Amino acid sequence: MRRTLISLMAAAAGTLGACSLDITNPNSPTQSGALTNPRDAASREIVGVLANYRDNRADQIRSFGSFGRETYYMFITDGRFITGPYRDWKQNNAFEAGTQWAGRYGNYRNAYAAIKLVNSTPALTPAEKAGALGVLNTFIALDMLHVIEARGAIGAVVDMTDDVNAVLPVVSEDSVYKWITAKLDEAKGNLDTAGASFFFPMHAGFSAGGVAANTALRQALQRFCAEAGLPMVAPPQKRRGKDREEQRHP
């Protein structure tokens, strides 16, 4: 038996020595590879932003429901989903206390990278670029809306730079809402010149090429801020260049 085991181990070692374990991972494409077909790469990046937003939405409903005492998420193999929001909710490091942070900023980073690609590639027409920027900026605003819904008076970070390790300032709650509404205005300006269709797949629920959804979101945000007593930016047609710059950098 011992000789048999030694023989098998020797055979396995010889087999491993003759094989290459350098396997290509198709789920982790390189930037250089993506740039060989920037049009397809941009389409995949945009769809990825939408998919991540949808995935994060389920987590938001679960965690908000627990903290709001409206749902009870019974995860049999991980009791922290119960102890975090129900027992340890006053602790800064309670499980789920960071909900709507990492996932939302991760998707913001994805959208930021997609915007850079869309702006830099000659493979897209001006109308196609406008459509892509309109959708990406709308979803950045949406992600940031959910961040500030979770953080409230704590505030949030609104800026994004090329440096993934940069420590950026946290701004006040009202400043975040101003930034979101300005971002929605920017997105609508893009969507207004996007043409009749997008070069990337979009769900049929986004009516009127995304313009109606963007407008409805901004109107809902206006109503929320009015009810909560938060300051709101002026309508787009009444703003001036200086005001627009101040709203983008509160």
Image (cartoon, grey):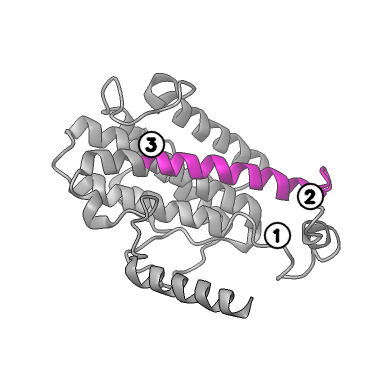
Q: Is residue 84 left or right of residue 15?
A: right
Residue 244 location, x and y as percent?
35, 48
Residue to which mark 3 is pinned: 135
Residue 191 location, x and y as percent?
33, 30
**Quadrant of the image for the N terminus?**
bottom right
Magenta residue check for 13: no
Residue with the most extreme right position: 87
Q: Nearer the observer, disc 3 or disc 1?
A: 1
Residue to which mark 2 is pinned: 66
Q: How far apart in space, not on screen, are marks 3 and 1 (Cα)?
A: 29 Å
**Quadrant of the image for the C terminus?**
bottom left
Instruction: Please state which amino acid type lies under the numbered disc 3.
Output: Val
Q: Which residues are magenta?
A: 46-75
Q: Tell me if I can see residue 233 in this picture.
A: no
In the picture shown, does residue 64 fall above or below 20?
above
First in sequence: mark 1 vs mark 2: 2
In the picture shown, does residue 200 fall above or below 205?
below
Q: Residue at x 41, y 45 (%)?
A: 182
Residue to which mark 1 is pinned: 96
Q: Tell me if I can see residue 77 in this picture.
A: yes
| Quarter of the figure with residue 93 | bottom right
Our reading of the magenta stretch's main secondary structure is: helix
In the picture shown, does residue 10 fall above or below 208?
below
Instruction: Please state which amino acid type lies under the numbered disc 1.
Output: Glu
Local packing at callout 1 (Cα closer than 10 Å; few below 14, some 14-19, many 20+) is many
Q: Secondary structure beneath disc 1?
A: loop
Residue with the most extreme left position: 122
19, 156: nearer the viewer: 19
Q: How far apart in space, not on screen, are marks 1 and 2 (Cα)?
A: 9 Å
Q: Residue at x 37, y 65 (%)?
A: 21
